[in-house]
Amino acid sequence: MKVVWAFGISLLAAFYISSAMVVGWAESSEKVTEFEPVSLEDASYIDLMDEINRLMSVQPADIQDAETAKETFDRFETMVRGLVKINDLETAAKLANHARKLFPDQVRPAFLAGWVKGLEGNHKEAIDLLLEGLGEKTDILPDPDSTTQSEIKTTLAGFLIESGNAEEAVTYLKELTQDESAGALAHYLAGLAYHQTGDAYQCAKSYKQALQIDENLASPNDYLVYAWAEDKLNRPKRSDSILDKGIERFPMEPGLYFNRAANHEVMGSSREAFYDYQMEMLVGGEASAFSEEAQKRINKILSIQAKLPSPDKDLMNVAFYIKAHEQLANVDPAQFEDEAALKKQYERMDSYLDKVLEGVREPHPFLIYLKAERLMEKESYDQAANWLEKATEDFPGQVLFEMKLAQVYAKQGKQEKSEKLIREAQLAAPDHWIVRETLGPNQTQLTEQGLGGDF
């Protein structure tokens, strides 16, 4: 069985999610001015507009010598990079094009104009400008250590990949990555390009080098691409390790648990696959395209287990617990002769999950979620808090645990702690089903009495 890799977003989208892409393909962060969005009434906005107007009024006759040329272009470059950072591409483009007219045969303005053009989505024009830039001069605007030439090749490769010309991009990226001083971005783009060309070996190698230099470069989709490459090389354990890291960094991202579950199936770990598919449905909710498929995979695993002479005991016990929980949630207590008979059914249900938890030192997040949810149903809030506090430490950023803990704190009268968790969850995953469910259908903030819904 091979993994059918399910990529949640396109590679084009991945470019814009990656942190390095916030200011485009440029790796030289020291060149980026720390611009912050300002209101029209701010004095800083007026200063900004004054500088933009001054730059747009510069004429060739104003540039009398090499020193003035360098100082003038440095001002253009600083302003353009800063405007890109605050996403004012229209103004950035005007400045970049004006700088190109002032210095029509120089490398640095050619790069600036091509870079911004590509960020605007005009990839063909951007590629043409950047190709021109490769043959431009540096006599008026020096390019120490060929830094801008490297930026041109990196940026050119990025826009070629976005345009579907990965093979052409590889020619530039090979040259860049052969240099031992190559930055993370060149290796990262190489990983994307080799994925498009189907070269799994080079894809995996490039991603490994990129993430060793700067792990923050990767989007959730990059972990899927990297894991795909390792799977193609018949290295499922490496795929598993990569997906572990992806889930650690992006615990609320749909698709990661699903793909790790599929990888577990390949390795014969049906139990872990079962748990991960369950987590996928919790993380993604009903709206996720992965959830429906995850349920199908769960049903298939259970069907196979039921036919085995020796099924996985832990897996089946968890399945029995889930089924019993669903049945008892919908049962009419009047069906039982007395309260003791109903209590016995609940005790039997609880025993399925407790048997599994007694045998593991580090429970899977899905087991923790089930246990905490059950303790809350039993109004054992102190015990639930213990489980969930440890879970939030062991799995930081997992909003499922944070919201459950917020509910527990509210029941314990710890409103300040509860509200803090809610605020953090609203920032991290404002549209997630568990956030909406906890606050109630019509609430966007907490009331004086605590959380808005019943739980």
Image (cartoon, grey):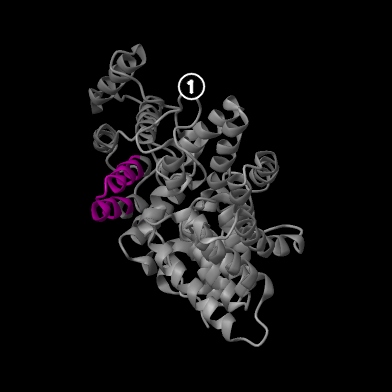
Q: Is 117 located above or below residue 159 in the figure? A: above
Q: Is 454 located above or below residue 296 in the figure? A: above
Q: Is residue 239 left or right of residue 73?
A: right
10 Å crowding of disc 1: few (<14), some (14-19), many (20+)? few
Provide residue 91's location: percent of width, then percent of height: 26, 32
Task: Look at the image and tell me whether residue 440 can be seen.
Answer: yes
Q: Main secondary structure of the magenta part?
A: helix
146 or 409: nearer the eye? 409
Q: Is residue 139 left or right of residue 177?
A: left
Is 307 part of what is drawn in magenta?
Answer: no
Q: Which residue is under mark 1?
A: 448
289 or 16: nearer the eye? 289
7 or 56: nearer the eye? 7
Figure label count: 1
Q: Amino acid at mark 1?
A: Glu
Provide residue 111's location: percent of width, then percent of height: 35, 45
**Residue 201 picture quarter:** bottom right
Q: Which residues are magenta?
A: 109-130
333 or 110: nearer the eye? 333
Residue at left 40%, top 45%? 24
Residue at left 36%, top 57%? 12
Task: Look at the image and tell me whether residue 256 can be seen.
Answer: no
Provide residue 161's location: percent of width, then percent of height: 36, 61
Residue at left 59%, top 69%? 320
**Residue 100 picture quarter:** top left
Is 124 part of what is drawn in magenta?
Answer: yes
| Element assignment for label 1 | loop
Q: Is 93 located above or below residue 125 in the figure? A: above
